[in-house]
Image: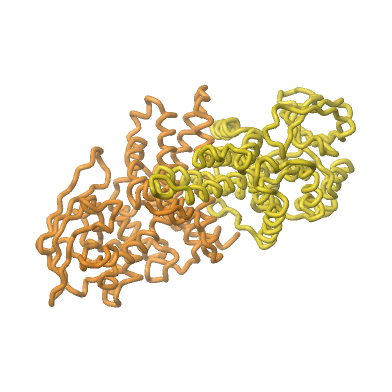
Amino acid sequence: MSGSPAGVGAEVLPPSVLPGDEELALREVVRDLLGREAPPMAAEFAAGDRRERLWATAAELGWPALAVPEECDGLGLDFLTQAGLLEEAGKGPFPGPLTTAAAAAAVLVAAPPGDVRDGALAAIAGGAVASLAVVGDEAGEDLAGAAAAVPDADLARNFVLQGGSGLAAEAFVVAAEDVALEPFGARVDAGRPLFALRFDPAAAVALGPAPGGLAVARALLAAELVGVAERSLEVAIEHVGDRRQFGRPIGSFQAVKHLLADVYVAVERARSLTRGALAGDPFGRPAAELDRDAAMAKAAASEAAQAAVRTAIQLTGALGTTAEHPLPWLLGRARVGAQQLGGAPALYAQVGREAGRR
Amino acid sequence: MSSIERVCAEYAGWLRDFLPSGYLEDPSRFRFDEELRRRYQREACAEGWLVPQWPRGLGGRDLGPLEAVAVRVQAATLQAPKLLNIQSVGVVAPSLRTFGTAEQRERYLLPTLRGDLTWALGMSEPAAGSDLAALRTRAVAGEDGFRVDGQKVWTTQAHTSDLMLLLCRTDPDAERHRGISCLLVDLDSPGITVRVIDTGWPDTDEFCEVFLDDVAVPAERLLGDLNGGWRVAMESLNHERDMIWIENYAAAGRALGHAATAIGAGDDHSLDVELGRRMADVAALRLTGMRALESRLAGGAAPEFNILKLFGSETLQRSIALGLDAAGERGLDDSELLLEDFEALGATLYGGTSEIQRNIIAERVLGLPRD
């Protein structure tokens, strides 16, 4: 575990997770954009072509290129800075494929350089959407020709496939023209629609193994969920400060205070784990350590987002369930995000199992 | 090697040289070796490892705040011998250094750091626990000092301590936080009776009741300003509250290490999820502690400091509870684990209960209205 009892020095003091100036400036821009472009009402949030328009704006601002290496036409910034951007976007939550493309790019960055991988990264940096799908969990299985619950596939130019264990434990790229799509499931989050994919495995180009890629993708998704959780907490705080019952603001009751204090702890817990997983050079750490830290971060952020939005809905009463309120929108993002790339129990179990093995 | 790694390695090297052979393999064997613990405090003080951020000659070696915390984490994870009278170094010494007169510092500070003088904290009373400002122990100022009457309770180690840092009411007419003063009281003064309260478990720190009946305290034993005792108490306790997470982190990590071994040895995977969740707690505790400190050093607000006491103590309890579940019936024969479980029950009480911590978070961090 982080900080094993015998640790010395570096183990004691992890790399700094504080936001740098660049991150702080980026967050400001995200806040501005969301303030202008994203009305706070659930009913309108993903209406019309808002996803496409916001993605185009994001691409103009260079956001998809943030953590893409410079040799692939990216800005070559660190993942921690990108996490700050996604956290801020989660507070909208941003109704476009920003996190989706960031997760796909993380797997590509981890894959060995080559024409296809470099080209796919350059495409993302240039504003082409890519989406990540995890396929083939069974050991020894060949690359499957199908994937479920793939986010923002309708806008994707490329798909990055991360195989499970066994023979297919490597990353692949398949172009959108080789993929058939159909909508997957109920429309839980209109800002992040999900799709089922079918494709001919022969059309997918193998890139080789991408160690740590899925882990970084998980941590980036965790960053967005921290933003979802924080915004939900803010919404709840505002409401319980205004709403009066029994002659006083309901936020003055301890029953309410303690619920929100626990949400705050969950948010900070998730934030610390997320930033800790991405601090420094994540790919420079042993892969098992990165996998574990990212699994903990994603599990914690899934829990924090779910707890925060559900507590907020409870405290806002029936108001928080209406289309005139931001909470249904935040709930949608929390529900989808919590399950993407692994839900909390499965990820905790993975961490626990690994620890027991050592 | 960074300066932090270097200083941690230096401390660890010193500690290894100091400890008797076999200690690091099984520190629990030495838990009740009071002579070793006393000697550790004295030598750590002399070498500057006791309060590493303080000046040389005062138990420190002028380390920066991050380095000092790293050394504390190192000491906790290596299970350096526990100080016999932790509140003396953790609470009393910082109060003396910040609020003491030159004479008070000269007389008490170094002997306290060395362990030659030991202290009890006279804070809680029968009617003043979480609501500390409700305290009623009364000190009346006269020409030759104070006369004190009242009662303290849950006063850890009052029966073995030399002195008591006493919070008492000196102005009954003032707003209640403004009528409190802090006195340095000899526990062998006439009029003081100390009664031990036995805990329901052997080998744990003993609580006491302290009765004060017309106790004379010289005027020069006032610490800080007259009626300025609330500030003395809060600053001293906050300092300690910000650091408690380090002990919680180390102890919870140890509990999880044992739990992982027990869980990994069996075929039962029902505890895998719980183990993973608690490992995330422990990792998050360390990251949040360091993030809060870095943020404060960078001049930020560092609101996350306010979760460390609550999160640390609850993480400790949950990790030990997992250890008990992982051990199953065998755990009922593990006196070390059972003792840790009992001691951890106190972690959500002392230094501000979890309920008070949640109020603090809600009101001071989240800005919810006071009730």
Query: Could you say where residue A36 lies in the image, as x and y percent from the top left?
Result: 71, 54
Front residue of A78/A177: it is A177
Compared with residue B110, is residue A309 higher up or lower down, i.e. above or below? above
Left or right, residue A357 beside residue B130: right
Rendered residue at 37%/36% (across/down): B337
Chain in yellow in the render: A
Query: Could you say where residue B113 lies in the image, as x and y percent from the top left?
Result: 32, 64
Query: Could you say where residue B327 lies in the image, as x and y percent from the top left?
Result: 41, 29
The reply to whether residue A272 is visible in this rendering is yes
Left or right, residue B192 beside residue B348: left
Front residue of A152/A142: it is A152
Front residue of A158/A73: it is A158
Compared with residue A133, is residue B184 higher up or lower down, i.e. above or below? below
Query: Could you say where residue A309 lies in the image, as x and y percent from the top left?
Result: 56, 40
Dividing the picture into quarters, in which one does residue B323 lie? top left
State the hue of chain B. Answer: orange
Left or right, residue A352 beside residue B85: right
The reply to whether residue B157 is visible in this rendering is no
Rendered residue at 36%/61% (across/down): B43
Dividing the picture into quarters, in which one does residue A168 lie? top right
Compared with residue B121, is residue A351 higher up or lower down, i.e. above or below? above
Instruction: Check the picture and name the quadrant holding the N terminus of chain B.
Output: bottom right
Rendered residue at 15%/58% (across/down): B150
Left or right, residue A333 beside residue B267: right
Q: How is the image coloured?
A: by chain
Please state the total of marks drawn on the protein image. 0
